[in-house]
Image: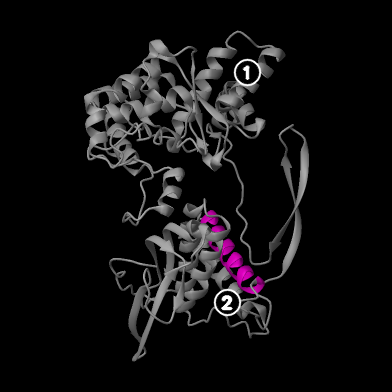
């Protein structure tokens, strides 16, 4: 696990991200390609050599941006790091999912240190004195005090359960707790399948798991589509476009237009490739232009959904083409490593840096010898631009205005429904619109699409309810 600089010595457990992790084996003597290790442990000199495993599968033993859970003294916490490595080897294309798990284990180690507990000490006969039960009580206290959300506490406890399951199931590690860390139980969860039928799935949970209460606000105007999204009104959309034009940053302006006119999520927008828009519009045979996205294309999709297409209307394509072949975009590409390669990103920073690094690019780094950064770009520059510039500009005319980039996806969906369903309130039209919008927005579950189709009617009912809610009782109180 080479690193140019040692991590800063923390005072509490922490997470340190290695630019690249290469799984190696120990050798007793030097040889070509072996890396020497020479240091002191508890006053004794330790010297050996590391070598990469000689196999064609070595790329699957190399992981970019690998998180390590460190003890308070800066040393790796062995059992946590072993579990992270096991997960990385099991899902080498999902390395980005390790960081929240590592953060959950860091929080657990911090709790253990604070209360003087050992992670492997389950000697207490009283189960409520075992580390896992004590940690659940600790998390519940944080929830009750408002210091932690239910969802965060649930995620942390889930990481701890997964951690111990790995340790107990690994014959190599041989962890056998004196008493059980929890009690398993099977519950049935109801869900709606793709055809709209109710199904029940049996899942295993534990008595240390923390449930997340699902209570929806009665007057909520948001759409549940991979998160709570609030569609922008026509007035807000107009203010947004005017503000983007006034601010004059063409890259961020076009990013917004792509989301508004295609419904693409942020990871898709920011991993578009300039070569896909290099062809002049006059040479495109059919509109809208169908752009394939997903694994193997270099353009990210949520959950690595494959064989999906982004429908790019002619006007939007023309704007993106004009930008892609402009001197401004070309100059930015020249500052990047890929230069004018068609697979270079469409949107780059003024210094040639990426706004979001695709999973395909991260996986390609396995065979690379180039030095890497500890963190990858995940759209933070765009989010900062929205927070620091766009929202303050719009608030000059709409004082309480707020939005997140993902809201543009919901805005696209509702704009599409309004245009298609206007004066077309028939069952046949409903089913057609539902199917088309599901394909456009890559919805796995048609029930998500239904939320868009039915949104206007629900909002009308909501507004009617708000206007008349308890009105008769209020009149009675006022007249008394």
Residue extending furthest toward the bottom? 43
Q: Position of residue 271 (x, y in %)?
A: 41, 36
Q: Residue at x 59, y 61 (%)?
A: 158
Q: Nearer the viewer, residue 359 or 110?
A: 359
Q: Residue at x 49, y 58 (%)?
A: 98
Q: Which residues are magenta?
A: 150-169
The quadrant of the image that shows the N terminus is bottom left
Residue neighbourhood size for the residue with mark 2, other residues' Cα within 10 Å, grouped as few (<14), some (14–19), many (≥20): many
Q: CA distance from mark 1 to mark 2?
A: 53 Å
Q: Position of residue 41 (x, y in %)?
A: 37, 86
* Tag 1 secondary structure: helix
The residue that label 2 is drawn on is 131
The residue that label 1 is drawn on is 433
Whether residue 108 is visible, yes or no, is yes
Q: Position of residue 439 (x, y in %)?
A: 60, 25
Q: Is residue 163 part of the magenta span, yes or no?
A: yes
């Amino acid at each position: 696990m080479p690193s140019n600089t040692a991590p800063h010595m923390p005072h509490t457990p922490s997470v340190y991200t290695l630019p690249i992790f290469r799984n190696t084996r120990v050798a007793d003597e030097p040889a070509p390609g072996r890396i020497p290790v020479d240091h002191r442990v508890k006053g004794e000199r330790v010297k050996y050599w590391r070598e990469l495993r000689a196999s064609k599968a070595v790329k699957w033993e190399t992981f970019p941006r690998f998180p390590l859970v460190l003890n308070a003294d800066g040393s790796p916490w062995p059992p946590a790091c072993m579990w992270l490595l096991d997960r990385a080897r099991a899902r080498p294309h999902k390395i980005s999912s390790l960081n929240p798990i590592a953060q959950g284990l860091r929080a657990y180690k911090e709790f253990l240190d604070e209360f003087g507990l050992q992670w492997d000490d389950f000697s207490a006969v009283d189960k409520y004195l075992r580390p896992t039960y004590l940690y659940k009580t600790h998390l519940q206290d944080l929830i009750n005090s408002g210091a932690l959300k239910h969802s965060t506490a649930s995620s942390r406890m889930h990481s701890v359960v997964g951690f111990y399951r790995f340790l107990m199931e690994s014959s190599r590690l041989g962890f056998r707790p004196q008493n059980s860390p929890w009690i398993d139980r099977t519950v049935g969860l109801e869900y709606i399948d793709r055809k709209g039928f109710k199904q029940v799935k049996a899942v295993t949970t534990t008595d240390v798991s923390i449930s997340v209460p699902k209570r929806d606000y009665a007057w909520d105007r948001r759409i549940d589509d991979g998160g709570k999204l609030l569609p922008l009104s026509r007035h807000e959309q107009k203010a947004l476009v005017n503000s983007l034009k006034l601010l004059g940053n063409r890259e961020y302006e076009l990013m917004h237009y792509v989301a508004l006119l295609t419904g693409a999520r942020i990871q898709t927008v920011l991993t578009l490739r300039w070569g896909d828009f290099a062809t002049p519009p006059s040479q495109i045979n059919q509109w809208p232009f169908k752009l394939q996205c997903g694994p193997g294309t270099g353009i990210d999709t949520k959950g690595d959904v494959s064989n999906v297409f982004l429908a790019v209307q002619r006007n939007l394509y023309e704007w993106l083409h004009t930008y892609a072949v402009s001197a401004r975009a070309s100059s930015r590409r020249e500052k990047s490593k890929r230069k004018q390669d068609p697979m270079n990103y469409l949107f780059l920073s003024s210094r040639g840096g990426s706004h979001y690094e695709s999973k395909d690019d991260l996986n390609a780094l396995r065979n690379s010898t180039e030095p890497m950064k500890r963190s990858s770009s995940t759209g933070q520059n765009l989010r900062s631009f929205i927070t620091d510039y766009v929202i303050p500009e719009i608030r000059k005319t709409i004082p309480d205005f707020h939005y997140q980039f993902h809201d543009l996806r919901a805005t696209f969906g509702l704009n599409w429904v309004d245009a298609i369903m206007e004066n077309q309130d028939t069952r046949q039209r409903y089913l057609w619109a539902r199917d088309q919008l599901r394909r456009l927005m890559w919805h796995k579950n048609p029930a998500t699409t239904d939320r868009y189709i039915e949104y206007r009617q629900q909002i009308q009912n909501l507004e009617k309810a708000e206007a008349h809610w308890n009105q008769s009782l209020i009149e009675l109180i006022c007249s008394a």
